[in-house]
Image (cartoon, helix red, strand yellow):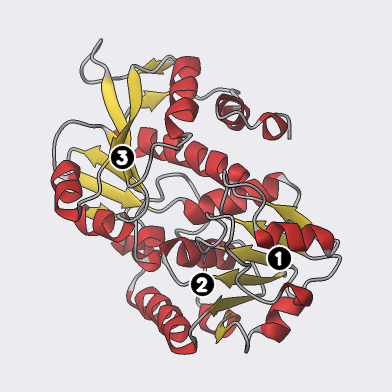
Amino acid sequence: MASGFDKAGIVERLYVVGHPVSHSKSPAMHNAAYRELGLPWEYGLMDIEDADEALRFMHGAGFLALNVTTPFKPLALQAAARSTLAAQLSGGANLLVRTDDGLVADNVDGAGCVAYLERRGISFSGVRVAVCGTGPTALAIVHAVLAAGASRVSLAGRDARRTADARDRYLDALGRLDSSEAAAPLAGGKADGADLADAPARLRAFDYASAADDLAAADLVVDATSLGMHAQDPAPFDTALLSPGQTVFDVVYGHGETALVRAARQAGCRAFDGEGMLVAQAECGLRGIAAASGRAVDFGELDLFGTMAQAAGFVALASA
């Protein structure tokens, strides 16, 4: 049950912004949750291809919150008056919430990834993680798994210098920031406020060839690249490195079984696609919107994950 709204009876608008977004499951998931919670909110699509137009929309007044996707995550961070550590350290935001003090930005990719995998029984304490990619999604996941207690995180990418630069940007930003400089964690995630003083010792960076030993030894391999969105896309690295006992997670969903997930299953690994992360980050985002905007929402015992998964058509996830 919802209460404490500034304008009783007024429907507040929320959108997913990016290009393309016509395939997005977000409206179905969010609107189902709003109905269950009795919220006077309505969630829709805003397909925008031009960056200037997207920025004008972000600075407009016609919404309570935005989920921001490709290619505008860095732009969303720039548009915000304040941002969480996760958004600042990843270099991009996928959630903007309107507050009395302006837009607040967060990145819930990492929180969603960790929350979903923990839901599937995976503990991050002391594990070795390899993360493929150098963009905001990859860095948000790096931040979240470090905060969750991973003993070693290996960032892997196509180009050694670019990957090392991504690692260095993250660590440089981490060194300049402390929790007092960032907004409170919107979704109550572990990443903001976690003790990451030893992050430089735990975070490594390689190109894929040089990362072979780390990929083979990782307890968890996360692919945070866009590979797999097209049927002909290869896996990001040599999947002969995979072996039984590893867990493989691919953030891509909705495009069939990716080459990485298929190879991981053939190698005897436990493998997941990005459907669960999508639902978990939607739940994190909804809780964050309520917290940042000051809307009093009684979440009670509602299984938001199950409600959203079912609305998205992810039947197996709804009961997981």
Q: Picture quarter containing residue 152?
A: bottom right
**Residue 119 place in picture, x, y as percent:** 69, 44
Residue with the mark numbered 3: 66
- Amino acid type for the residue under numbered disc 2: Leu
Q: Is residue 179 above or below residue 13?
A: below
Q: Picture quarter containing residue 147?
A: bottom right
For marks 2 and 3, the one nearer the N-term is: 3
Residue with the mark numbered 2: 196
**Residue at horizontal 40%, vertical 84%?**
165
- Residue 228: in sight, yes or no? yes
Q: Is residue 158 above or below residue 93?
A: below
For marks 3 and 1, the one nearer the N-term is: 3
Side of 293 where 249 appears, left or right: right
Q: Which mark is residue 301?
A: none
Tag 3's secondary structure?
Answer: strand
**Residue 270 place in picture, x, y as percent:** 79, 56
- Amino acid type for the residue under numbered disc 1: Leu
Q: Is residue 191 above or below residue 5?
A: below
**Residue 89 place in picture, x, y as percent:** 38, 67
**Residue at horizontal 47%, vertical 26%?**
28
Tag 1's secondary structure?
Answer: strand
Label 2 CA crowd tier, 10 Å (few <14, some 14–19, many 20+): some
For marks 1 and 2, the one nearer the N-term is: 2
Measured in 3D between alpha carbons, the distance from the residue under mark 1 to the one under mark 2, in whole angstroms, is 20 Å
- Amino acid type for the residue under numbered disc 3: Leu
Residue with the mark numbered 1: 220
